[in-house]
Image (cartoon, rainbow, N blue to C red):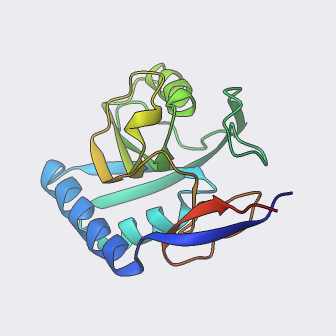
Amino acid sequence: MFKYSIGTLISKEEISEKVKELALQIDNDYKGEEILLIGLLRGSVLFLSDLVRELKTEVTLDFMIVSSYGNELESSRDVKIKKDLEEDIRGKNVIVVEDIIDTGHTLKKVLEMLKTREPKSIKICTLLDKPERREVEIEVDYTGFKIPDEFVVGYGIDFAQKHRNLSYIGIVKKEEE
């Protein structure tokens, strides 16, 4: 393991304001309808929890565990579904809630799989988007922040299962030894 430090990229207050904005957008888009929010674990759990508390729309929750990073700084691009949904999504309005979209490979695989299950609609909500890193085409419907090509942690996002508990989004900076 290498030595690193963490610098602040997005504050706790900025995150809170953005979550409220996203909830308002979703509420406006789904007036009078129900939605199923699918959280991609583990990174999305804090964002999803805060988002649900801000929504006025009737929601149901389900979760998937999907992995392509392991303990590395770079995606392996080998996407693994470790836990699938328990809910039947046929005929439902689905929003996949993601912590961060990087290359897009993970989300593309998840969307391909979910679309075969015939939802009424399927949209994507992400807290963080790294468009510079995109390798596959992904249309994001609700975006919190577009961020630079940096490795980030905090607010549910980890590095080797550490730093999820930070209340802000920080940049991991590798230190010289």
- Which quarter of the figure is the N terminus placed in? bottom right
- Residue 96 is situated, as x and y percent measured from the top left of the image, at 43, 43
Q: Which of 173 and 40 is in front in this view?
A: 173
In the image: residue 26, left or right of residue 3 = left
Q: What percent of the width, then of the height, locates residue 113?
A: 54, 23
Answer left or right for 156 relative to 129: right
Residue 40 horizontal/vertical position (percent): 56, 48
How many circles with numbers are drawn on the protein? Answer: 0
The C terminus: image quadrant? bottom right
Task: From the viewer's perspective, tell me whether residue 7 is left or right of residue 131.
Answer: right
Q: Residue at x 18, y 63 (%)?
A: 24
Residue at figure coordinates x 46%, y 64% from the top left:
47
Image quadrant in which you'd find residue 2? bottom right
Seen from this angle, which residue lies furthest front?
Answer: 176
The vertical placement of 42 against 165, above or below, is above
Q: Is residue 119 above or below residue 92?
A: above
Residue visible at 44% across and 23% down? 115
**Residue at position x 52%, y 32% from top?**
103
Outermost residue toward the right? 1
Horizontal and vertical percent position of residue 63 = 58, 50
Instruction: Report which quarter residue 158 is drawn in.
Output: bottom right
